[in-house]
Image (tube, grey):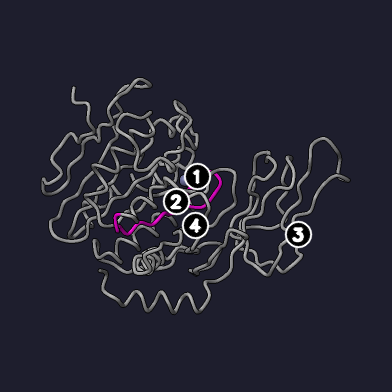
Amino acid sequence: MIQVPHLTFDMDTPGVSTGHLVVPGGADCEALLLPLFSLNKGEGPRLLITGGNHGNELQGPIVARRLVDWLPEAQTCGRVIIVPEINPLAVQAWTRNTPIDGKNLNREFPGSADGSVTERIADAVSRLLLPMADTVFDLHSFGPKWDFPPAVVTHPIADSNLMARTLRMAEAFKLPVTLLWEHDDTLGMFDTWAHRQGKLFVCAEFGGGTVGSEALAIYEAGVRNALVALQLVKGNADCPTFRQQKSSRTLQTLLSDALKSPSRGIFEPRCSSLDEVKQGDVIGVLHPMDSLSAGSIKICAATTSIVCAIRSGAHVELNEGVAILARPLDDERRAHFDLEYQKVPE
Ligand SMILES: [Zn+2]
């Protein structure tokens, strides 16, 4: 048996190919076979779509599988590779992290060939799939504990031209929110690693909560819009309808916009995602379980903001996130990105 990651078919074969990405076995588990779809129509954009990076975000795997069914009759050029579940062990367990080694795949890139199973998955994806793509869509959701709108997220990128092109790609999904998200825990993320290789990488965050058919239609429409923008398929892009509205806006959120729980307990949301709040408005209430209402703590907005994410389930620990506030991308930043976008990448 070959002990290096490999594909079970030749990716240069024209047309549709299906097979597996084989992640070698190790001391902790046997080899994994990740189903993979490739549609090669020659010259054109090279796109990689992945889902199931976190196992309790099933929206991505479902939308990825819809694309596998739909793309053969729609794609006109280029190559699209789809791996609906890059962490099948976590998907089977419906857990964010891999149950065998407890690791978060989205903090293990570029991985290690002789590491634990999560590191071996990251290594196989980094070494075999990433070099075959110029653009990557990694399909996540905010998970079952959160109220979150359909969104596409990017973190700030040091290369300002790549930042501008990435934001433009993210906005092409035309989902209700495109979020420029300042985050303090980006080491080992798939996007951080791909950006270092100069790839266009956007992370779809397909809402929060559990999976529902209405929301899935929005997410699928978003990915189709992005495929139109990449000119991989023909058609017109249109904002999907969300809460009776067809709108798409770009927000930014800073580290200081993440509200943390002041105590362990039950969080009661007092607003919904996309609500507008003013300074002092109550976002939610934290109820410690060792006392009754007298011990409850109000959590308030520090400034006028838009509620981007709000916790909607599960007991919270001290300092755990309960809300993420945001505001529209400021004009100065927008003008800078527009200018950068016009420049030819080096
Ligand atoms: Zn995720």
Q: Which tag is nearer the camera, tag 2 or tag 4?
A: 4
Residue at the disc numbered 4: 150
Give how far across and how far down residue 236 sits, in percent. Answer: 32, 69
Q: Which tag is nearer the camera, tag 4 or tag 3?
A: 3
* Residue type, mark 2 in image: Leu
- The residue closer to the viewer here, 68 or 333, is 333
Question: Few, some or many C-alpha atoms within 10 Å of disc 3 (few <14, some 14-19, many ≥20)?
Answer: some
Residue at the disc numbered 3: 282
Q: Is residue 205 magenta?
A: yes
Residue at position x 68%, y 70% from top? 304
- SS for dot 1: loop
Q: Which mark is residue 216?
A: 2
Give how far across and how far down residue 312 sits, in percent. Answer: 64, 47
Question: Few, some or many C-alpha atoms within 10 Å of disc 4 (few <14, some 14-19, many ≥20)?
Answer: many
Question: Few, some or many C-alpha atoms within 10 Å of disc 1 (few <14, some 14-19, many ≥20)?
Answer: some
Of label 1 and label 2, which has the lower sequence position?
A: 1
- The residue closer to the viewer here, 225 or 11, is 11
Residue at position x 56%, y 63% from top? 253
* Residue type, mark 3 in image: Val
Mark 1 residue CB less than 8 A from any atom of ligand 1: no
Rendered position, 161 above or below 39: below
